[in-house]
Image: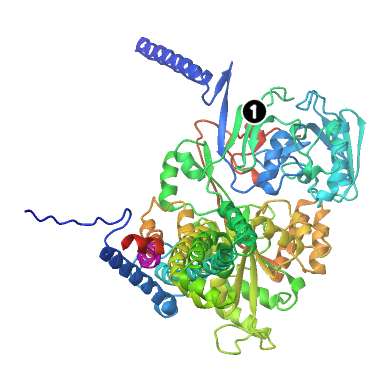
Amino acid sequence: MTATTVTRAPAPGQGSPRGTYVAGAIGGLIIAFYVVLVLFGSQLAPFRATELAGPSLAPPGGATRLGTNLLGQDILSQLILGARASLTVALCAGAGTVVLGGIVGVVAGWFPGWCDAVLMRVTDLVLIVPKLPLLLLVGALTGGSVLGLSLVISLLFWPNAARILRSQVLSLRTRTHVRAATGFGAGTWHQLRRHILPDLTLLAIAEFIPAAGRAVGLQAGLAFLGVGDPTLPSWGAMIRDAVAFRALFITSAWKWWLAPPVIALVALIVGITLLGAAAERRLSPRLVRHAR
Amino acid sequence: MVRRHLRVAAAAAVFALAAAACSSTSENAGTSASTTPGQQRVTLRIAANTQSGGYPTPYAAIRGPGRLITTYIFDTLAFPDVTGEPKPWVAKSWTTSPDGKTWTFNLNENVKFHDGMPLTSDDVVFSFNYNLTGPGAASGVAQGVTYIDTVTAPDPKTVVITLKTVRPSFLQDIAGAFGFAIMPKHIWSTVTDPAKFQGPTALIGSGPYKLENFDLTTNSFNFVANEDFFLGPAKVQKFQIVPVADALLALERGEVDAASGGNSLIPKIQYDALAKKYKVLTAPGEFNLALFFNQAKGFPYNEKAFRQGVVYGLDRKDMVTRLLDGRGIPGPAGALGPGNEFLNKNLPAYPLDKAKAGALFDQIDLKDRNNDGLRDKPDGSAFKIPLSVSSTDTQQAQLVKEYLRAVGLDVDINAVDQQTSDDRGAKGDYEMAVQHFGGLSGDPSGLITRFQSTTRSTSFTRVWGYNNPAFDKVSNDQAVEIDRTKRGALVDQMQSILADDLPQISLYVPEQITFVDSAKYNGFAYTPGCPPCGATGNKRNLFTGNADPAPKN
C-alpha cells in the first residue's frame, strides 16, 4: 500500500500565510521608518527645506549628502521633511475615507429599503465621478493644503469602503446573536455599538490601509501637477521641479535630484501595500474564509 | 588650365541645377518650401509660447506674445524694422506739422482686407475712434494714448491725426504689437463687446498672413501668406507656431527652425551643444522679474527705508547665477531695461549689503523683539510678509524668501495661477508681489501708466500707492519734450527718482538668446522697438525674408 500525501494549494491570488506575514512585517518596518522621519524630521534634516544649502546642482558630498537642486536646496533635507506631507495625507485621507464610507455603509446596511437604495445610488454616482479633474479643480481652489486635500480625497474615494462595510453589516444583522438581541428588544444604537461596530473594526482597518496608499500617490501626483503649497516640502513637488529642469537627463543631476524622491515614494507605497495585503488576509472575512 | 576650371564650373552648375530640381520635386511633395521663379519661399516653424495669448484679435489677445500673433493678421499705419524705428507699412509716408501736433498719413494703394474689401482711410478713422472712444476704449487696449485729439479722413487715402499735446512717442505708440490695429469697419462697426468677438470674420484683417488654423489650448497657429497683400506675397510662405514640450530640444530634433531660451536657464552643456550647431543671436534683455511693493497697504510698505532695506537684502547677482547660469543681469533700478536707449547708467546698483539692510529696518523700528531671528512690528506683533506670486515663479519666490529671511524678514509665499496673479496685480490686492513682464526697451512714457499717482491703468504692471509729485511732473515734461537731448536728461531724472524711491525693483533681466537655423532663413533678428517680436516674430522680416533695415519714411 502506498501512502499518498495531499497538499492543499493556496487559494488563487494568495501566497503562503507565512510569506504574507513576512511581507507584512517588512511593510510595517518601512512605514515605521517613515513615521520616525515624520516625528523627528526637523531634528534629522541638516537644513530647512527651502534653505540655500550650497551652490546650484551640487553633486552629493560634503554638507549636502545627497546634493542640491537648481536653487541650491539640500535634497536630503527635502526628502526627510517631505515625508510629513505624504504621511499626513495618508493618515487623514485614509481615516476620512473609512469614516465616511463606514457611516454610509453601516446606515445603508442596517436600514434596508429606501434608505439603503438611496445611499447606494449616491455611492454609485460618486463612483463614476471623474476623480482627477475634480481633484485638480478643488485642489487649486483650496490652495492644496494637506488637510484640504485629505478632505477632498476622502469625499471622492469613500464608496469602496461603503460597499464593503455595507455587505458586512448585511451579513452581521442576520447572525444569531444579533437577531437574539433584537428579540430581547435591543435598540438600534445599542445593537450598532455592541454588536456591529466592534465586528467592523478589523475590516475598517483593512480598508484604511489601501486608502492611505492611494492617498500618498494622489498627493504626490497633485504636487507634481503644481497643486499645493510650493514651499511645503513634498516628494511630488521635488519630482516636479526636477522634471521641469530642461537638462535633467543631459547632465547626471537626475541621479541625486529625481531618483531619491521617486525611490522614497515607491518605497512608502510598497510598504503600505505589503502591510495592506497582510492585514487584508488576516482581517477580511472573504480571505479568512478562503484560508480556512 | 582655364579650360579645366570651366569644366569644373560647368560640372558644378549641372550639379547645382540637379540639386535644385531634386529639392523642387521634394518641396512639391509637401515638404517645407516651395519655389517661385527667382525667389525661394520658405516655411518657417517656431515653438509656441507656453503661456496663453488669448484669442488672436486686437481686443481679445493678452500680453506681448498674444498681441504679436495679431500683427500677422492686422496691420498698423507703421511697423518697426530691425532698427526698432517705426517705418512705413499701411501708410506709405507721413508728414508732421511744424508744431508737431498734426500728423498726415498717406496710405498705400491697393490695400485690401482678406475678404477682398478695400482698406480706406475710413477704416483707419473707425479703428482709432473704436479704440479711443468706442467699445474698444473700455478694454484698456490703448489706455496710455489719451493725448490724441481727432482722427479724420479728408480723402480715401489720407488720414490726419491731431494731438492735444506734442508726443515724441506717438509713432511708437500707434505702431507695432501694441499699436492701433486697423480693423475692417464693415465687420467691426456692429461689434459692441470686442473682447468676446470671435469667429472667421473676427480674423479678417489686411495683414501679410491669413490664419489657416489654430488651437488655443496648445497656442499653435498655422499662418499662410496672404497672396493679395498690397506689397506682394511674403517671402515666408507658411509661418507655423508649433506646440513643443521644450523649444531647445525641439530645435535639436529638427522640429522647429529657431528656439529661444525663453527667459529661463539654458544649462551650459546644452548651450554649448546648440551653439556648435546653430547661429546664436543675443540681445540685451527686455523681460524681467520684478518685486512690487503696494504702498497703499501702509506700513512698512510705504516706508522708503523698508523698500531700500529689502533691495539691499536681496542677492540679485546670486539669482542670476542660480536661475540663469549667469546669462543676465540684476535689473536696473530705474525701471528701464539694459537695451533701452534711454537707460540711465548712473543709477545705484544696490548690491547685497545685509548690514545696510538691517540698519534701514532698524531705522523704522522693525526689530527682532523675541529673539526668534525674525523682525517684529513696532507694536511687538510678528511681521509676516504675504508674497503674491504666480505658480510659474515659485522657485524665484523661494529665493526671495530665503534672502529676506537672512535679514530677518519672514515671507509667506502665496502662489496662484497666472490669471489670478495678474488680477491681483491689477486690483492692488497684494502687499508684496513678484511679477514677470517684458517691454523694458519700450518708450519711457510707458512708465507714466505704471508709476504716476493719477494713473488709471488696469494692467498688473501698475504700481499701487506710489505718489511722488516730482516723478509725476518730470514724467509729464519728458512726454512732450521733442528735443532728444533735453528729453534724455528728463528721463534720466525719472529713473533716478524711481531708483531712490524703489516703488518696484527689477530682480533680474535675462539676456535674450535665440538659436537659429540661419541657412534656412535669413530674417532672424531682434527688433528693439518690438518687445514681443523676439528674434523670430517681426512680420516685416517674415515678409521680406531678410533682416535689412527698411527705407525711411
Q: Nearer the viewer, residue B239 or B242?
A: B242
Identify the secondary structure beneath mark 1. strand
Image position of A248 (left or right of B383)? left
**Residue designated by label 1:** B224
Q: Is-magenta flag for residue B274?
A: no
Three-letter amino acid code at disc 1? Val
Image position of B375 (left or right of B11)? right
Query: Neighbour class for label 1 at 10 Å: few (<14), some, many (≥20)?
Result: many
**Residue B275 location, quadrant:** top left
| Residue occupying the point 55% across, 31% down | B521
Q: Is residue B518 visible?
A: yes
**Chain name for mark 1:** B
Q: Nearer the viewer, residue B517 or B217?
A: B217
Q: Is-magenta flag for residue A276?
A: yes
Image position of B102 (left or right of B377)? right
Task: Estimate the x, y position of residue A55 in percent, counting from the top left.
Answer: 43, 66
What is the magenta range? A269-284
Tell me: residue A165, above or below residue B5: below
Task: Estimate the x, y position of residue B68 in percent, counting from the top left.
Answer: 68, 42
